Amino acid sequence: MSSINADSILETINMIRVHHLDIRTVTLALSLRDCCDTNVKAVGEKIYNKITKYAKNLVTTAQEIEDEYSIPIINKRISVTPISLVGESCKDYDYVYLAKILDKAARDVGVNFIGGFGALVEKGCTKGDIALIESIPEALAQTERICSSVNVASSKAGINMDAVLKMGTTIKQAAELTKDRDGIGAAKLVCFCNVPGDNPFMAGAFHGYGEPECALNVGVSGPGVVRAAIESMPAGASFGEMANKIKQTAYKITSTGELVGREMAKKMGIPFGIIDLSLAPTPEIGDSVAGIFQAMGLEHAGAHGTTAALAMLNDAVKKGGIMASSHVGGLSGAFIPVSEDAGMIEAAEKGCLTFDKLEAMTSVCSVGLDMIAIPGDTPADTISGIIADEMAIGMINKKTTAVRIIPAPDKKAGDKVVFGGLLGEAPIMNVNSLSSTNFVQRGGRIPAPIHSLNN
């Protein structure tokens, strides 16, 4: 064995054992378009049978791959066609019933989350879309594994402000119906602009309309690995040198995910879909995107320079990943969820990181305002204003942005919500108290920007 190969093997082992490199999720993406029927019970039966048929070996196959390659696969998940499309053919809408069927199928095949209980309404809502959105709070309160997403804006269509207004109320209701669990319903609900249909990460995963019958999409994560790579550089290394180091590290991480994804898809007899190389943190110490900012030289996340650091990080990750695979997709970049990142939690608790700074950072990150807890008495119209702002950032910049925000019932700024597991915990952050009501209640659609006319 050459010394180069030995060094490479030792480096990978160190990435896994010390710096939290893992396959964050393997997500079976499955079309349910052939499950439509006029009878909602028949739809439910078709959905259950199809999911359990395709996903019956998902968890066991993932465990086999883990054992074979000694690479941790943290989550096994499923994403499906937006359920508003599947249930719309029914004579009588009962989307809560379909949510329970999805939840049962997910439980029976052993996955922790199933995504796709959502709708695509960036240009307007059908009757089925409206019925599904109105059912979201109850569906999330009565299930354990369901994740919901609604795309309310795009760079081509503009921002559907009627849907934005409705989602402000929906988020409030989802939190209120799960107040005994700190409003966890809202933690499994996300609003998007420019949503990708091949994203394997929850809560926004769904199987896009232009996707194949099924595919295996893989999400790889390694913020601890990137931080360690930066810390290994000589003091005073330039930004160009740092960017190259991040690209090299991202290449290695993506190559690992590509290997696992293709081998697992082969064993399951389904197509390999995409690698989503996203630096998705966890509450574990050392597995933090905020920690990368500190390694770059910032005192804490939120310091002046944080947005620039995030922009460079996101770009370098994408450049390194795209060289390692021809099938990079999903979100791919850096996530900045508050409750799921130990460093972000600390920064928010110390007051180093404010809501407005987070919004500024979303202009260059991979997602948006993610897992942020706010006071429970925040008006629904204020939440709609927050969504509108974030959708505008995505629409104008032709990028994906999202809002996953938790108005924690009966809690105020300075308190804390605790969800446990990968959802973590978060301090309640202050939001602007000025009214957005007269603005968000105008209704209609904010037109798409001029660059949407690029045919």
Image (cartoon, rainbow, N blue to C red):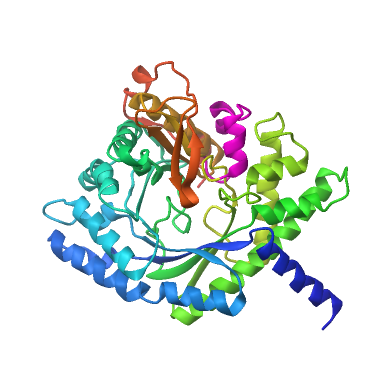
Tell whether 1 sits left or right of 326. right
Residue name at image x 71 percent, y 68 percent: 12
Residue 385 x %, y %? 41, 26
Residue name at image x 81 percent, y 44 percent: 239
Tell whether 226 sits left or right of 364. right
Residue 194 x %, y %? 46, 45
Which of the 4 image quarters holds residue 255?
bottom right
Is 216 in front, or is 427?
427
Residue name at image x 81 percent, y 72 percent: 7
Is 260 in front, or is 187?
187
Visible residue check, residue 116: yes
Is 135 in front, or is 411?
411
In this rendering, the answer to whether 411 lies above or below 423 is above
* Image quadrant containing the N terminus: bottom right
Residue sticking out furthest to the bottom: 1
Tell whether 172 sits left or right of 396. left
Tell whether 271 sits left or right of 116. right
**Residue 147 counted in the magenta span:** no
Residue name at image x 28 percent, y 55 percent: 83
Which of the 4 image quarters holds residue 260?
bottom right
For the record, the magenta segment spans 341-368
**Residue 362 counted in the magenta span:** yes
Count of numbered labels shown in the rendering: 0
Which of the 4 image quarters holds residue 225?
bottom right
Visible residue check, residue 122: no
Residue 161 x %, y %? 35, 31
